[in-house]
Image (cartoon, helix red, strand yellow):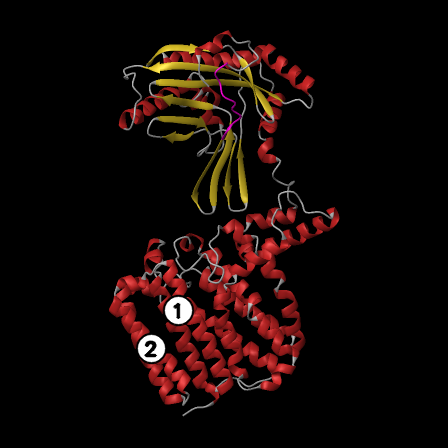
């Protein structure tokens, strides 16, 4: 908003030189789980060279349902003694502070600024900052000029009142909360100009909760009920986005974080949303994500590349048991070990590692996992819960409800300890290497469903070797990001060099064990090639431990193909059935 020419305009129209402006939209996200955003109509100031513009904004009326009602409300606003005194208080403040450090100060007559839901009385000020050259300021001089303007104008009467010092102390005594970022200056300083707004009509999002901030100007003649109603229709752009108050069950769940870790809240919310959808017979507003896209997102979370691990463990006891192909429970268990089980496990892991995964070069693809904020990940919780139910029902029919429940609780418990447990998680050594052994719970599932005996001690031992050394090897790729996130896992504590030494020792022991326990050339070759690859990685140096995303994708593709080929070999040959 600029231009002294506006002084001759009619009171209810904007200045001639003012471009169309509705509001400032802003968003600050300092943390993946929180964000501060808003839609503010109030300009703090704009600087173009030494030319400063600012607004006096006060008085509020809602927008009318018709043009006639809209015009009547605007006329009522301009005729209100209370509203005019409010805008004149802001006008007097701006004149007083601008005279301290500015020249050529002018302002427009009051006019109505109309927004989508409300309309305000506005006056536009123009001034020249004193002591600055007429040539456009750039770099440090512009930054210094912006700091001068900020000291003059912030805080404004709209958010602090006048006189400033006395009003600030009164607010501190009366307000029962910390404003945080609310009512602060938001804007930018570029090479040749800068512009700031006042961060009013805003919201702080923290996980599943939203704190809305709005206010009204109170002065002699204010009516408390009218001011309260004014705050509500000012905040209508935000409040209209949220459903009604939750039930007492929902309120209780929201108070207890540990219940959210058990997914109780998500199950109830999903059931409620499903019931509302059935009642409406159309998608509720704001739910633009189709079921197909939601399923695709959940599939990415399940990391299809790593289905190989659970498939390997499920098929290990069934080697050469061709007759199982004709049984339904065999295929039920095999399918469960792909999408359903991995969605459950990796969703818990992703929720725990939101901050770390942003820098993880292995994440972000279709096969290797998704990079997303926790709010987006939580939308997959209903899928993770519901997809378990038919499989758990089938398992209960096969080997009893009590055993099924015990097995599933063990799966949840191991994953919870790994991802959320205090000092017993993936963030702390040495249990970070052994918690992934929870994957081995797939083996008793396979044995129970298919009526098979437990694998030999040699097969269990080889699987333990494989899980522990694979976990340590993956950690060596993530040392920089894990260290920045504060993790104290084995690879971070040892460093890259000593981690590779430990990994080499584990692979050497694995190779010696395989040679002593099995006569299968495939298993021996697998351990030997793994040891050789580690030696190559150590020879190439640290750069090989931190490859580019493209290199990571290529390596994983080769290893994945080799893994599935090895799985077929082990199953067809019965490698773990044959000992030396």
Please state the horizontal and vertical placement of residue 86, each as a whole percent of the image: 52, 14
Q: What's the CA distance linking mark 1 and mark 2?
A: 13 Å
Please state the horizontal and vertical placement of residue 384, each as a whole percent of the image: 58, 60
Residue at 32% across / 29% down in the picture? 191
**Element at badge 1?**
helix
View extreme (bottom): residue = 580
View extreme (top): residue = 8
**Element at badge 2?**
helix
Please determine whether, in this image, residue 345 is positioned above or below residue 75.
Answer: below
Residue tagged 1? 471
Quadrant assignment for the C terminus: bottom left
Along the polypeptide, which appears first: circle 1 or circle 2?
1
Magenta segment includes 567: no
Please state the horizontal and vertical placement of residue 215, each as a whole percent of the image: 53, 26
Residue at 53% across / 29% down in the picture? 214
Asked if residue 483 can be seen in this view, the reply is yes
Q: Foreground residue, 117 or 482?
A: 117
Q: Which residues are magenta?
A: 16-24
Residue at 47% across / 44% down in the picture? 34
- Count up the numbered dots: 2
Please determine whether, in this image, residue 94 is positioned above or below residue 204.
Answer: above
Please state the horizontal and vertical placement of residue 382, each as a whole percent of the image: 60, 57
Q: Which disc, if any, is residue 524?
A: none
Q: Residues within 10 Å of mark 2 (few under 14, many from 20)?
A: many
Image quarter of residue 192: top left
Q: Residues within 10 Å of mark 1 (few under 14, many from 20)?
A: some
Please determine whether, in this image, residue 324 is positioned above or below residue 171.
Answer: below
Direction from residue 459 to residue 337 in the image, left or right: right
Asked if residue 263 can be seen in this view, the reply is no
Residue tagged 2? 507
Magenta-colored segment: predominant secondary structure: loop
């Amino acid at each position: 908003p600029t231009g002294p020419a506006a002084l001759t305009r009619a009171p209810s129209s904007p200045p001639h030189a003012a471009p169309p402006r509705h509001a400032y939209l802003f968003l600050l996200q300092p943390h993946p789980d929180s964000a501060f955003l808003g839609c503010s109509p109030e300009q703090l100031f704009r600087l173009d060279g030494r030319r400063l513009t600012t607004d006096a904004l006060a008085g509020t009326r809602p927008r009318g349902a018709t043009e006639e009602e809209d015009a009547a409300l605007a006329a009522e606003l301009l005729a209100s003694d209370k509203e005019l005194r409010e805008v004149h208080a802001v006008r007097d403040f701006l004149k007083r502070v601008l005279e301290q450090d500015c020249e050529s100060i002018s302002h427009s007559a009051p006019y109505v600024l109309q927004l989508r839901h409300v309309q305000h009385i506005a006056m536009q000020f123009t001034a020249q900052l004193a002591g600055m050259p007429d040539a456009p300021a750039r770099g440090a001089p512009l930054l210094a000029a912006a700091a001068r303007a900020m000291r003059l104008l912030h805080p404004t009467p709209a958010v602090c009142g006048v006189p400033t010092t006395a009003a600030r102390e009164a607010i501190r005594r009366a307000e029962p909360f910390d404003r945080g970022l609310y009512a602060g200056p938001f804007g930018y300083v570029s090479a040749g100009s800068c512009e700031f707004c006042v961060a009013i009509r805003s919201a702080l999002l923290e996980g599943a909760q939203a704190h809305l901030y709005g206010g009204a100007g109170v002065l002699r003649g204010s009516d408390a009920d009218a001011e309260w109603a004014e705050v509500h229709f000012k905040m209508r752009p935000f409040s209209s986005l949220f459903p009604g108050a939750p039930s007492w069950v929902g309120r209780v769940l929201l108070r207890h974080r540990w219940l959210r870790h058990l997914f109780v809240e998500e199950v109830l919310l999903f059931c409620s949303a499903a019931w509302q959808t059935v009642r409406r017979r159309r998608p509720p507003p704001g739910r633009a994500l189709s079921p197909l896209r939601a399923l695709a997102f959940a599939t990415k979370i399940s990391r299809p590349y790593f289905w190989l691990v659970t498939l390997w463990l499920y098929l290990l006891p069934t080697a050469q048991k061709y007759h199982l192909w004709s049984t339904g429970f065999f295929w039920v268990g095999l399918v469960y070990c792909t999408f359903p089980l991995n969605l459950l496990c990796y969703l818990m892991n992703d929720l725990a590692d939101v901050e770390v995964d942003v820098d993880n070069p292995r994440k972000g693809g279709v096969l290797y996992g998704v990079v997303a904020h926790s709010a987006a990940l939580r939308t997959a919780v209903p899928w993770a819960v519901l997809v378990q139910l038919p499989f758990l029902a089938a398992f209960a029919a096969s080997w009893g409800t009590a055993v099924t429940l015990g097995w599933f609780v063990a799966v949840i418990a191991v994953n919870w300890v790994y991802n959320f447990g205090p000092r017993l998680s993936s963030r702390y050594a040495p249990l970070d290497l052994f918690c992934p052994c929870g994957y081995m719970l797939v083996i008793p599932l396979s044995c129970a469903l298919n009526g098979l005996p437990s694998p030999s001690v040699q097969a269990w031992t080889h699987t333990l070797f494989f899980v522990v050394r694979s976990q340590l090897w993956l950690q060596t790729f993530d040392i920089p990001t894990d260290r920045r996130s504060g993790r104290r896992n084995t690879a971070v504590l040892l460093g890259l060099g000593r981690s590779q030494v430990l990994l080499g020792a584990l692979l050497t022991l694995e190779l010696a064990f395989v040679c002593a326990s099995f006569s299968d050339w495939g298993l021996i070759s697998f351990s030997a090639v793994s040891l050789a690859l580690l030696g190559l990685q150590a020879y190439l140096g640290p750069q090989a431990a931190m490859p580019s995303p493209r290199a990571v994708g290529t390596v994983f593709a080769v290893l994945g193909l080799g893994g599935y080929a090895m799985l077929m070999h082990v199953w067809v040959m019965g490698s773990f059935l044959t000992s030396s």
